[in-house]
Image: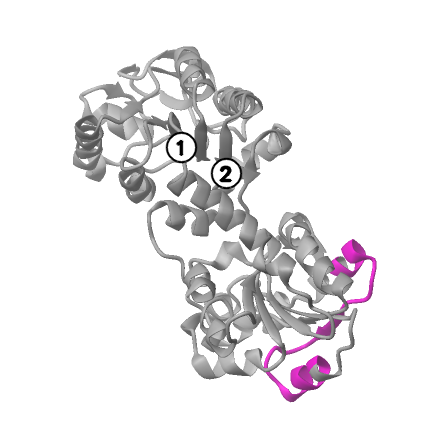
Amino acid sequence: MSAFNNHNFKGQKALIRVDFNVPIKEGKITDDTRMRAALPTIKKVLADGGAVILMSHWGRPLKDIEKKPHLTLADFTLKPVATHLATLLGTDVQFCEDCVSDDASAKAAALQPGQILLLENLRYYKQEEKGDKEFAEKLSKYGDVYVNDAFGTAHRAHASTAVIADYFGAGKKMFGLLMEGEVSAAEKVMNEAQKPFTAIIGGAKVSDKILIIENLLEKATDIIIGGGMAYTFFKAMGGEIGNSLCEDDRLETAKELLAKAEAKGVCIHLPQDSIFADKFAADANTSSGLNTEIPSGWMGLDIGAMACDTFSKVIRDSKTILWNGPMGVFEMDKFQHGTKTIADAVAAATANGAFSLVGGGDSVAAVNKFNYADKVSYVSTGGGAMLEFFEGKQLPGIAAIKN
């Protein structure tokens, strides 16, 4: 049983770092996925007879106000989050209009079992992102136990995500249920992967994914490359890619990655063909053909039929699957077939016993769009954090609890 589930919060105040950095438009939350993901952790503390003090950031207030003087701190308040959370939980959520103040201390001290307090945006203070010890210590005074349930910020050594853990002894700091699930799923893929292990890497740029590909060369049997980044590889190999996305300063990098994969016996699968378009638009004229022969003035915006067949077979034969990045511009109907086909194959492999982890904003958006979220083993809520984990980096938010 996990440390969190083992802990009895009766009569204790749990100071929980959540990731409530959700999209808000005109005071309304447009996607509450991250909030709903934190509910089991909050409910467990309340059910035990504990009180909950929540901390989160929202946006980048100080940086944005500097760039746009018409904005004020009030434009970055977590008040709408408190209102929405009360609706989700069906109970009152108290709100404090600061995170480190006499008022915050008083409200935290007065909190009774079964009650919830949400503190104002941590990033109203520059000390949060700087990992300031004094700021972290002030926050730590509010709770008896520290719970980090914010995987989306685990890659940042901020005051509330890493430094604060120093002020809690053994047995008084732990992951929440969401964080436990994220860490467990990620470690299962990286440290306990059954072979064949296929990593599906998509997205626009090779430069964004170099580190993850290099690290996966030590772990995976197969690496599927799709999305805009594939065309840099084809140009590096001497192909004609028309107006397709390409990082000319990464051509040598692409060649080096292919050579490293060959030396390690890892099979890199590039898409043989693409759906071409004469412009980047939903109403573009389309054609298809080999990725080494894209006509001048045309660009590849999705993987083609041959690539779909090849990739699907590799995925369906896999025992472990990591998916990070789409195969094309899936937001446009004409160019969503490749990404949907990959989602189909990942779901089929999962149904056949494979362990599948989907991580990264666009991949998560794709599985949600095509209603596959419940047909894969795990969908990660942490884009940047998950990426850095698979790049082989130590995440401060995880290290602070484990060490």
- Is residue 227 visible in the rendered image? The answer is no
- The tag on residue 202 is 1
User: Looking at the image, do the residues carrying marks 1 and 2 touch, with CB atoms under 8 Å apart?
Assistant: yes
Residue 188 location in percent, x, y?
Answer: 45, 41
- Closest to the observer, 295 or 389: 389
Residue 200 location in percent, x, y?
Answer: 40, 30
Please tell me whether residue 105 belongs to the stretch shown in magenta. Answer: yes
Q: Residues within 10 Å of mark 1 (few under 14, many from 20)?
A: many
| Quadrant hosting residue 48 | bottom right
Report the residue marked by disc 2: 362
Residue 110 location in percent, x, y?
Answer: 75, 83
Please tell me whether residue 242 belongs to the stretch shown in magenta. Answer: no
Q: Is residue 338 above or below residue 218?
A: above
Bounds of the magenta span?
85-108
Type of the residue with mark 1:
Gly
Instruction: Work out how far the residue at label 1 is from the one at label 2, CA to CA, in angstroms.
Output: 9 Å
At x 45%, y 17%, the residue is 312
Residue 99 location in percent, x, y?
Answer: 61, 77
- Closest to the observer, 129 or 152: 152
Q: How is the image coloured?
A: one colour
| Quadrant hosting residue 302 | top left
- Is residue 225 visible in the rendered image? The answer is yes
Element type at marker 2?
Answer: helix
- Closest to the observer, 168 or 100: 168
- The tag on residue 31 is none
**Image-based side of 116 in relation to 338, left or right:** right
Q: Is residue 7 above or below residue 360?
A: below
Q: Is residue 165 above or below residue 141?
A: above
At x 75%, y 58%, the residue is 84
Type of the residue with mark 2:
Asp
